[in-house]
Image (spheres, rainbow, N blue to C red):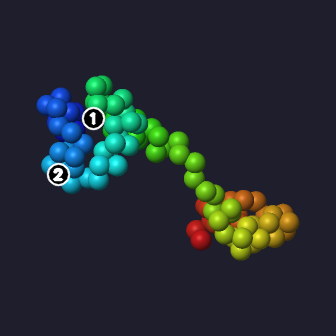
Amino acid sequence: MLSNFLRNGFTYRELKARIGFAMSSISVDMNNNGGKATYDGYEAESESCIRKKFRCKRKKLDISPGLKKYVIEQLRKDLFPEQISGIGYGL
């Protein structure tokens, strides 16, 4: 959709009015995906999915000190990670 508007010479301000997104969002999308001249919506969507898949995520143990303490205690009791998490044990 954006690529059609861009080919027809719409400005970011006109795109904002047509599709309801902020100009900054449109600008970021354009900059991430080839700019006005080479923007392709299908390619932009594909690249977005790839970026999302490989984005760094915070690990639960880094976020929750209590959980980290519990896991360390259980490992010191010689439990396996699967036992601690309950995977495969019907918990």
Labelled disc at residue 41: 1
**Label 2: few (<14), some (14–19) or many (≥20) C-alpha neighbours in 10 Å:** few
Q: Residue at x 29, y 49 (%)?
A: 23
Question: Do the residues bearing badges 1 and 2 touch, measured as CB atoms within 8 Å?
Answer: no
Q: Residue 29: give x, y in percent of width and height.
A: 35, 41
Instruction: Evaluate whether residue 46 shows in this view.
Output: no
**Which residue is under mark 2?**
17
Q: Residue at x 63, y 58 (%)?
A: 59
Q: Residue 36: give x, y in percent of width and height.
A: 29, 31
Tell me the SS state at disc 2: helix
7 on left or right of 53? left
Query: Counting residues from the N terminus, which is met first, the one under dot 1 or under dot 2?
Result: 2
Q: Residue at x 30, y 25 (%)?
A: 38
Tell me the SS state at disc 1: helix
50 on left or right of 70? left
| Above or below, 76 relative to 1 | below
Labelled disc at residue 77: none
Q: Residue at x 53, y 46 (%)?
A: 55
Instruction: Evaluate whether residue 42 shows in this view.
Output: yes
Q: Residue 81: give x, y in percent of width and height.
A: 72, 59
Q: Nearer the viewer, residue 49 or 15?
A: 15
Q: Nearer the viewer, residue 48 or 83?
A: 48
**Label 1: few (<14), some (14–19) or many (≥20) C-alpha neighbours in 10 Å:** some
**Image quadrant containing the N terminus:** top left
Q: Residue 19: give x, y in percent of width and height.
A: 19, 50
| Above or below, 69 relative to 23 | below
Say which amino acid is labelled 2.
Ala
| Above or below, 2 relative to 17 | above
Q: CA distance from mark 1 to mark 2?
A: 19 Å
Q: Nearer the viewer, residue 24 or 56?
A: 24
**Which corner quadrant of the image does residue 62 belong to?**
bottom right
Say which amino acid is labelled 1.
Gly
